[in-house]
Amino acid sequence: MKMLLTPGPISTTDTVKRAMLADYGTWDSDYLKLTEKVRSQLVAVANGNANYASILLQGSGTYAVEATLGSAIPKQGAVLLLAINGAYGQRMAEIADYLSIPHINVVFEDTEVIDPAQILKAAADHPEITHFAMVHCETTTGILNPIEAIIPNLAAQGIVTIVDAMSSFGGVPLNVVNLGVDYVISSANKCLQGEPGIGFVIAKQTTIAKTRGNARSLALDLFDQYDTFEKHPGKWRFTSPTQVLAALAEALQELKAEGGVQVRYQRYITNQRSLSAGMATLGYEPLLDATAQSPIITTFRYPDADFDFQNFYDFLKKHDFLIYPGKLTEIDSFRVGNIGAVYETDIARFLSIVKQYDGATVAKKLVK
Ligand SMILES: *Cc1c(COP(=O)(O)O)cnc(C)c1O
């Protein structure tokens, strides 16, 4: 089987995959219980309390982002402030444009961490701002943004805050109560190590309770999805991805068995450090400063002008590793993920394959 060193879907355990080998009736009490268990476990992963609820949504992560922006923000009298340092921040701006949500963008370089001072200044300069959204780990580069230095401050000013924690949730510790955040968005198939097909939102109940009628879309009405779960525990509003939910339930058990988010975070850090150090000795320089680097995914510069990414990719694939192309327009780069059912021995094996590749290309150049 191929090992995915990507930002998701990622390599899952055999037991998570096997959890999908069953059929479930969506009105059956076992399935309703399983859904409710997943909902409460997700709040626990976020270190939430009874003031928070999780809302599951059919679809990939972007569906949950679009549902949140389209339901949290009223149609009149609201302005969204966006902090952007990569493609996923840009995607929120694009969603806001589609939904005709007025927004102010504060844009940083992709290699630059979002600066809290500039965000707080923008909020002070624009008293019309009612909502704020940012990405936690910008998967474009793998940069980790300082939500702790931004969210509590804006929340204290009465601004509704939204964090896209898609690629960090379950892999980097986060505490919704300490942040005072209103919405945190993620999906099943990244650090939670489940299968793709479910997005979810951890929402502050007093905030979401006030959003009835805001939605610009029926299927992506987050309030109605929340209301349905609250009134009919375990019952999804429309057909639910039953096998994906069963896999997520198993994945959450495995997160607990591993020791929780803190232990998984350490494993990812170890993966990332071994990968980064090993690649550097082979001539592949990481793009980001170590201080800005998340443990989720690492961007590497091409080692030289002759580097042929497709050739490199094909070689790795032949040895059962799949990586990701870069997502930067200005710098030639590729990305390697550190998340999923991936351990130090896998990183060591990956590095040995990269070393073989370098040997093979050097030999080819000598022949020429
Ligand atoms: C993966 C990801 C998304 C959502 O992507 P989908 O392809 O829709 O699952 C959104 N934001 C971030 C930061 C991501 O890493």
Image (tube, rainbow, N blue to C red):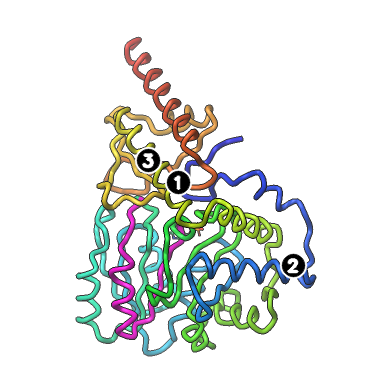
Label 1 belongs to which residue?
A: 267
Q: Picture quarter containing residue 177?
A: bottom left
The picture places residue 121, in percent across and down from the top left corner, at 20, 76
Dot 2: few (<14), some (14–19), or many (≥20) neighbours within 10 Å?
Answer: some
Residue drawn 59% across and 71% down?
40
Is residue 356 found left or right of 147 in the rendered image?
right
Label 3 belongs to which residue?
A: 334
Secondary-structure class at tag 2: helix
> Does the magenta segment cover residue 219?
no
Q: Amino acid at mark 3?
A: Phe
**Front position in the image: 84 or 164:** 164
Residue drawn 45% across and 74% down?
183
Residue 296 image label: none
Instruction: Give the magenta-colored segment's residue range.
Output: 142-167
Q: Amino acid at mark 1?
A: Arg
Is residue 233 found left or right of 71 in the rendered image?
right
Residue drawn 48% across and 86% down?
206
> Does the magenta segment cover residue 145?
yes
Q: Earlier in the sequence, mark 2 or mark 3?
A: 2
Q: Is residue 45 above or below residue 195?
A: below
Discs 3/1, front:
1
Q: Quadrant of the C terminus?
A: top left
Secondary-structure class at tag 1: helix
Dot 1: few (<14), some (14–19), or many (≥20) neighbours within 10 Å?
Answer: many
Dot 3: few (<14), some (14–19), or many (≥20) neighbours within 10 Å?
Answer: many
Residue 31 image label: 2
Q: Quadrant of the N terminus?
A: top right
Q: Earlier in the sequence, mark 1 or mark 2?
A: 2
